[in-house]
Amino acid sequence: MRALSLGALLLAFVPAAGSAQDARAQMQALQIAPLRFNPPQPKKVTLSNKVVVYLLEDHTLPVISVQLVSKVGVANLPDSLWGVGWQADGLLRTGGTMRLTPDSVDKLVDFYALNISFSTDHELSTAGLSGLSRYTDQLVSLGFEMMKSPRDDSSRVRITAAQQQENWRRRNDTPGSVLGRAWSQVVVGNHPLGRSLVNPAEIAGFTSERFRWVQERLYCPQNFVMGVSGDFREREIVALLEQQFRAWPACKPGLREVPPVAYAAGPRVVLIEKDVNQTNIRMGHPGGIKLANTPDYFASQVADFLLGGSGFTSRLMSRVRSDSGFAYGVSSVWGADTKREEQFFAGAQIRAEKTVAGINLMRAVIGSMATEPVTAQDVKLAQDNEVNSFVFRFENPGQIVAQQLGYAVDGLPANWFDVYLRGIQAVTPEQVRQVSQRYLHPDKLVIVVVGKPSAFDRALSEIGPVTILPVDSIKR
């Protein structure tokens, strides 16, 4: 009896065919107002020393975040200090201050539950300070002291040197690491933007004095753009920042402009022999596009999404993985920067016995962006994805402020958010075809291959003349 009752109950919840159609029609008839995304705008103030600060108050939670972005990085250092520059951020955090030993700094960080971090990159350096707002004075004072008077304790310098020695020893353990470093060496050469690993000669030059020389020039007032978000009052935080900057000396000379980049031209095939089951491949050439408010830039971003940036719906993934089964994953990146053109490249891990067939297929798919036009539905998918995902970069006040800092450093307008979305939404299928035709050149690709030639389906030389690059000759 219980089973019959349960069956009757389930049947009661199955809608009749007619009612389902009625419900569908009602849903389609709904009028939904367009969604408007208007993130709050930080307030821009300028301190007495000309440092620009973006402020966004939010008293929802008792926390505060202070972000500092320095408009110079490791590539601005003399070549002799490049290796020191990449580790200068870690020493700022772990090396103590002239007043406080490393252990004393750690105890203060733990006692007040502070988060303090530093990071150096090719063309910028950053500091992040966050914690409970009731400890704002302690947070800012300690974070600024670490930048203004770094100790770079010799014991911590030795630890850093030992860690980098181990990184160097293990540099060729994984094919992905070999491919990335080989690609940079082949395409960018010894340019500071192409270096990724500190070598033994540079490690031997690690000293407290050299670290301080670098830190004093990367982290100094005139290079900074700042942002503060969270639980604070404008008058109080501005007064605190003015106090911290008051005794901070001006930036010292010694840095340089980043040298111009000359990317290698193709066609070219480079092989690094390594006994692996999957062949690691990267192919590309100069991207030809700058990040700017231009139709070509926006069309290139849509093209990259459809070619290799959209996961399983991309052309590369569909044809190289799903249709042919040559690779587990394949993707593309069409880079752009406000200062210069970046690189376009596609990469994959391909079954060794399908290496040459996979390379040829990837080249053909790249070329198909010009010869097999994308549809309006394809472009709409890319536009919707970008619009819907872009808003997640503005989920909290810290992210909103970080976006403004990024725009300021890159020389973009404060409303770049709106400009970018309008530009993406204006792209047409024909613009995607045209930008692909002008800037993607499957016949001019530099192709770098890490794998075991004896396992390849055919000789790599079928693609073109092959240059052998011994793995131990990859310098950085």
Image (tube, rainbow, N blue to C red):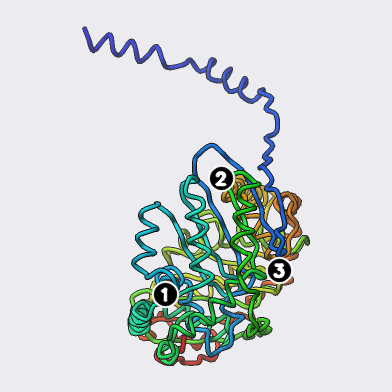
- Kindly identify the residue that appears in the image at 22 percent across and 9 percent down: 2
Q: Amino acid at mark 1?
A: Gly
Residue 93 position, x and y percent, is: 43, 68
Residue 191 position, x and y percent, is: 59, 86
Q: Compared with residue 468, is residue 313 higher up or lower down, i.e. above or below?
A: above
Q: Is residue 352 visible?
A: yes
Q: Which residue is mark 1?
A: 176
Residue 33 position, x and y percent, is: 70, 29
Q: Amino acid at mark 2?
A: Gly
* Mark in front: 2 vs 1: 2
Disc number for residue 148? none
Disc number for residue 338? 3
- Sequence order check: which comes first, mark 2 or mark 1? 1
- Sequence order check: which comes first, mark 3 or mark 2? 2
- Sequence order check: which comes first, mark 3 or mark 1? 1
Q: Are marks 3 and 2 in contact (CB under 8 Å)?
A: no
Q: Quote the CA–CA distance across marks 3 and 2.
A: 30 Å
Q: Quote the CA–CA distance across marks 2 and 1.
A: 40 Å
Q: Quote the CA–CA distance across marks 3 and 1.
A: 28 Å
Using a 10 Å C-alpha cutoff, classify the residue at mark 3 as few (fewer than 14 neighbours), some (14 to 19) or many (20 or more).
some
Left/right placement of residue 13 relative to residue 118 reads: left
Q: Are marks 2 and 1 in contact (CB under 8 Å)?
A: no
Farthest top residue in view: 1
Q: Which residue is mark 2?
A: 230
